[in-house]
Amino acid sequence: MVELKLANGVDIPQLGMGTWQINDRDNLLEIIKTGYGLGYSLIDTAAAYSNEMAIGKVLEKLGIPREKLFLSDKVWNTNRGFEAVQEACRRSLKKLKTDYLDLYLIHWPASPKLHDDWKKINAETWRGMEKLYQDGLVRAIGVCNFKIHHLEALFKTSKIIPMVNQLELHPGMPQLDIVSFCHAHDICVEASSPLGNGEILTNEKLIALSHAKGKTVAQICLRYGVEKGLILIPKTKNIKRLQENREIYDFSLSPQEISMIDNLPYCGGIGIDSDEVTEFG
Ligand SMILES: NC(=O)c1ccc[n+]([C@@H]2O[C@H](COP(=O)([O-])OP(=O)(O)OC[C@H]3O[C@@H](n4cnc5c(N)ncnc54)[C@H](OP(=O)(O)O)[C@@H]3O)[C@@H](O)[C@H]2O)c1
């Protein structure tokens, strides 16, 4: 599996398995077992997905050596703050039956719309993330859904720059400005919903391009992420698609094709605005 390097030197697989809305333990076992066999080692979960315990049980059952996996988790909005984020991380470690995470992310920034002191809340949560990193409980730390103003505010107090920003990003939502900003600050961008939660797959221009390339629309979307240097975590409950989503390194997109995709009209998959997000998502 192709790997990218985070700012602290940690290698992260470019392609991983998203697990949002996968809660059934049996299906999880089949997905992780097959995915691992195909070379997927990055598993993206979150406290909010309510599947950490199921993933922990599956990993224990499969007996995959811990160092062969790249486990990524996220702290939920109700656990912001210096102490709370550390307690939340320890709870997640217990559920996943591991003593460290490869990547720990703040799921959403505190939103200016709901919190007058959003900068202070984010700064304190980040201080807790830095402590987890210094204590060796997590190999890398980052954020999700942070816009430029959230990051600029964070930079004023942070000792460590986030290593990753996980954002909804796919054809129809290319997020060009924040990607450039992150890359200029050595922050890896991880595309959540790289298939637009399935919504972008019926786009006519992408279908035409997929025919021209002899690839599926999903593969075009994922290759677009590869061309942009992103980490990608598509989610599938369908075992056959695990293989399909992996076959993205045997073709490329031309600058013209990339530009066409950059300019597709907005098509949101999840489409939550992080300046409006509530404690419940
Ligand atoms: N940080 C955040 O706030 C945040 C937000 C959203 C998502 N995420 C992470 O990103 C991951 C991926 O995002 P997502 O789950 O929203 O959606 P996604 O990966 O963009 O799309 C998933 C949808 O596409 C379908 N699909 C997958 N592969 C396909 C293929 N080859 N051909 C056709 N359809 C295909 C899936 O159906 P089947 O399952 O039936 O294949 C599912 O309906 C999540 O699981 C989660 O880990 C993070």
Image (spheres, grey):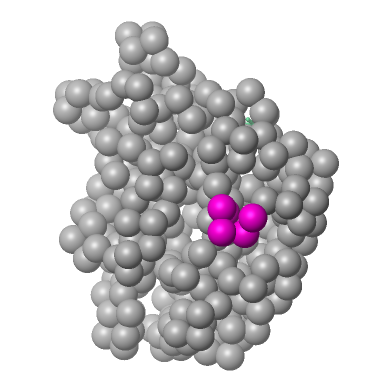
Q: Quadrant of the N terminus?
A: top left
Q: At which x and y percent is residue 122?
A: 44, 81
Q: Residue at x 38, y 41 (%)?
A: 2
Report the span colored magenta.
65-69
The image quadrant that residue 77 belongs to is: bottom right
**Quadrant in which the C terminus appears:** bottom right
**Left or right relative to 223: residue 180:** left
Q: Quadrant of residue 95?
A: bottom right
- Asked if the stretch drawn in magenta spans residue 236, the answer is no
Q: Is residue 170 visible?
A: yes
Residue 102: percent from the left, percent from the top?
51, 64
Query: Principal SS element in the magenta part?
Result: helix
Q: In the picture shown, does residue 99 fall above or below 239?
A: below
Is residue 199 visible from the viewing direction of this image?
no
Displayed quadrant of residue 221: top left
Residue drawn where x is 49% and y is 21% of the image? 202
The residue at 53%/24% (across/down) is 244
User: How far across and down, in percent of the image, does residue 106 sit?
Assistant: 50, 70
Q: Quadrant of ligand 1?
A: top right
Q: Is residue 181 above or below residue 231?
A: below
Q: Nearer the viewer, residue 194 or 270?
A: 194
Q: From what the image shows, is residue 153 above or below residue 232?
A: below
Residue at the spot x=65%, y=84% of the render?
87
Q: Nearer the viewer, residue 2 or 194?
A: 2
x then y, percent, for residue 114? 50, 76
Total numbered badges shown on the rendered structure: 0
